[in-house]
Amino acid sequence: MQLAASRKIWGRIKSATHSLLSCIERGGPFARFRSSRGRLPMNRPAALANSSSSNTSGVFERISNPNADRGNRANAVAPANPSDSIPGTMTTAGAASALSRSALSGHLDRVAGCLLGKMCADVLGAGVEGWSPADIQLSNPNGLTDFLNTERGFGCYTDDTQMAIALTRSLIACNGRIDDVHAAQSYAEEYQPCRGYGGTAYKILSGIRRLGVDSESIRTIGTKLIPTGSFGNGGAMRIAPLGLVYRHAPPKVLREAVAAALRCTHVHPVAVDGAFVIALAVGYLALRRPAAAAAAATNPSACGPAAAVPAAGSATTDNANGSADGGSNSGAAVATAITDELAQVATPLLLLEYLLSHSPLLETDGMVQKLQAVKAFVVQARQFKGPNESWAEYFSSPGWAAELQLQAEVSEPFQIRADDAAAVALAALCCHWDRPDDAVVAAVHYGGDTDTVAAITGAMAGALYGTQWLPARWYDNLENGTSGRDEVLQLAVELARFDTCT
């Protein structure tokens, strides 16, 4: 209990310190009343390739200009939600706000579900980061199912979501391809210390802002502070957008892309392995359907908790130009289409077997062993939380005790290692497969790095189920200013255009 209490106190001190640093960096306490925070004009890869290293030191000079702006923010209005705790966060009008998740379908719904699922789960977990499972349960005996207020503000996300947004922007700017230098610039440009970044990330990203980065310096940035490179979960927490774009790419190409996306911060094999597994999972899930939802589509009498989950974007539609392995999908007749669709069904066991089938691309034994442990757990088919079972009831069940035991087997209490975070997030998803919102709640109740593990879980759930599973109490309370919910929804529209195979 003393350790948990000290973690809570340290978390509050860290958040307060980051908030103070952010106010100083953004121009003081009144910075939040700007229409948008200053932003770096991003260079395209071609321009970067033609620039000399001697000129990169000035790349971030304009970051402190309060008038610098990404896009036209003339329509910005006063904040209509508590997210003005984040400097520069304002509610915006425009094309993004005209979108509605109810109008989404197909692959676009998967992309939006992945990004917004990550955001919702991140916010849910942020309020208890560093807490033990026992402390979280004690404070939330009926389950932590609603957002808590934090130092950042109610409904405000952390660095987990912010870095994913930055990666999304970079992928869009680079026409669906990863460019390590451009991605590094994007991370630094999006970066706000008050989001809760760790010390190493803070130093790297603020350093990129001051000094810039080019094709030569990017090779060494990731090992300047930690000679072997960070094995942390910061890469796995942001990698989901890349998994969406490279969903049809050969796994070897995907791994190279993952390494490029992580190059400025996480080059340790453990970090790359963890991020690669999550990117691989996201791409796999985005091309498949939940088993029960697929059964309901072909058997109207199908029942069960998952039958009510919308089948967001069928695999047949998403694979019109190629399957996950790069092959063609004939779809010549209705029967063939149904067969193909059912062949693309996703189950926990199929997902884990798919990930393990690519273990030769993993550089560490630890990641393989953790995946095997989660698979062995799933194969035993324990009784997990039922659709009508309350969290209070489930917390006292053998199923929950077994879940916590699995966490102890595959991870340290605080899942700072990328392979730990990846394994625990996969466990949450697989144990609560038919109810993605329960998967997110379970990920939070596992304790430790709750925002990160939940965010990874939410991203995978959204890639499979789209947006309709997101509870209104989460979706409606997300911060909605600059880089908020509606802008992320618009980014999803742009990101969904890309399908990179090489």
Image: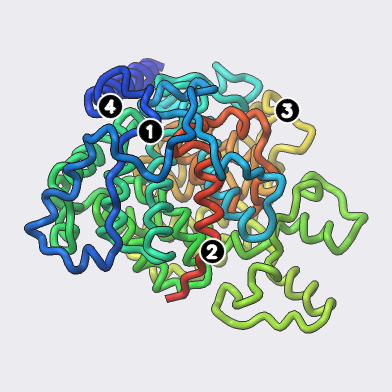
Looking at the image, residue 7 lies above or below residue 347 = above
* Residue at image coords 13%, 54%: 56
Asked whether 359 or 488 is in front, the reply is: 488
**Tag 1: residue type?**
Ser
Looking at the image, do the residues carrying marks 4 and 3 touch, with CB atoms under 8 Å apart? no
Dot 4 or dot 3, earlier in sequence: 4
* Residue at image coords 47%, 31%: 76
> Which residue is tagged 1?
36
Dot 4 or dot 2, earlier in sequence: 4
Kindly report which numbered mark, 4 or 3, lies closer to the viewer in this rendering: 4
Element on which disc 1 rests = loop
Element on which disc 2 rests = loop
**Tag 2: residue type?**
Arg
Residue 192 in picture, x, y percent from top left: 31, 34
> Which residue is tagged 2?
497
Asked whether 237 or 489 is in front, the reply is: 489
Residue 229 in picture, x, y percent from top left: 21, 52
Kindly report which numbered mark, 3 or 2, lies closer to the viewer in this rendering: 2
Residue 160 in picture, x, y percent from top left: 41, 40
**Tag 3: residue type?**
Ser
